[in-house]
Amino acid sequence: MIDAHQHVWAPGPDRYTWIPRGHQVLDEVYTHRDLVTELSQRGIQSTVLVQAEDSLDDTWEMLAVAAAEPTVGGVVGWLPLHEPRDFAAAVEELSTNSWLVGIRHATGQPGAREWILGHESVRSLRELASLGLSLDLVTSDPIQLSAAIEVATRHPELHVVLDHLASPPIEEQGWEPWAALLREAAKRPNVSAKVSGMCTSAGGGLRRPAELLPYVSFALEVFGAGRLMYGGDWPVALVGGSYREVFETTTAVLSDLSDSEKDHVFHSTAAEVYGMR
């Protein structure tokens, strides 16, 4: 099995500034080795480390972890897509690293919609596709999800991954416009999504499987299991529950899938999208 979404970090005064200083869970050092035993107990053989900071330092640090840890199968790093010169220099240096399988950007930053759809990013996104790298996007509202759909439409050769099921409104038990936009995203064959981050989007508390089932079932309806992948979102998900609890909640939600469908969600989708060894 593959866990397609994990993070590692060591917060500091100028690092990972999105983490609230003094936060009782997140403001701690988390290494991949902290999770190895949990992964083994759950039967997970490989993981994908995902960027937690818009910096090349974060990317290089994850690549170093991947080279040293046999349970890391790939890295989704960061590149300055909106800065053509900086992007060209960075991608030349990074593109030969076999552990790099994708790039991620959060579209919730000020002006992110404008630059990711702007002229400066076109060449960068085309280059990502030509290198076989995917683009993970974090979307937390309809405007951001609409931008992700537009990126996928303009760049059909680029594989776009929607992290955390594009943030369904679980806490408020909402539905639209998330559902309509997710259905629209699924019409693009180059888009897939991660069944991840549900604890965080559920208001910081681990929800019962019955509360999550409508959202996951809808994602299965529009994408099919072949374009969904499991992600534990550790250590962010620790705000809601332990890795074991998150894993068991997810497997309970997916318990009615066939063995073939489970193989897609827990292995083959991530292996295909990220080209993992």
Image (cartoon, rainbow, N blue to C red):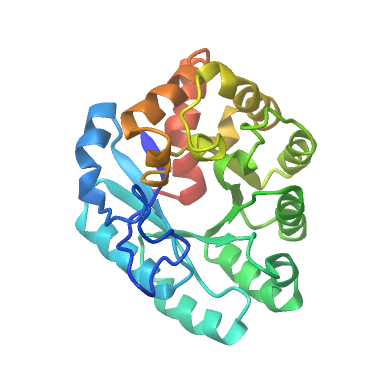
Picture coordinates of residue 160 (x, y %)? 62, 52
Picture coordinates of residue 54 (x, y %)? 49, 69
Task: Say which residue appears at 57% left-offset and 66% top-offset.
Answer: 128
Position above or below: 177 against 149: above
Residue with the most extreme top position: 256
Task: Say which residue appears at 50% left-offset and 19% top-offset.
Answer: 208
Position above or below: 27 against 114: above
Q: Is residue 133 visible?
A: yes
Between residue 249 and residue 171, name the one nearer to us: 171
Q: Quadrant of the N terminus?
A: top left
Left or right of 58 on screen, residue 256: right
Between residue 176 and residue 42, name the one nearer to us: 176
Quadrant position of residue 93: bottom left
Picture coordinates of residue 130 (x, y %)? 58, 66
Q: Is residue 277 visible?
A: no
Between residue 81 and residue 249, name the one nearer to us: 249
Task: Say which residue appears at 48% left-offset and 67% top-offset.
Answer: 78
Between residue 24 and residue 147, name the one nearer to us: 24
Position above or below: 139 against 79: above
Position above or below: 57 against 232: below
Task: Say which residue appears at 41% left-offset and 46% top-offset.
Answer: 236
Exactly how many numbered labels are in the figure?
A: 0
Left or right of 41 on screen, residue 13: right
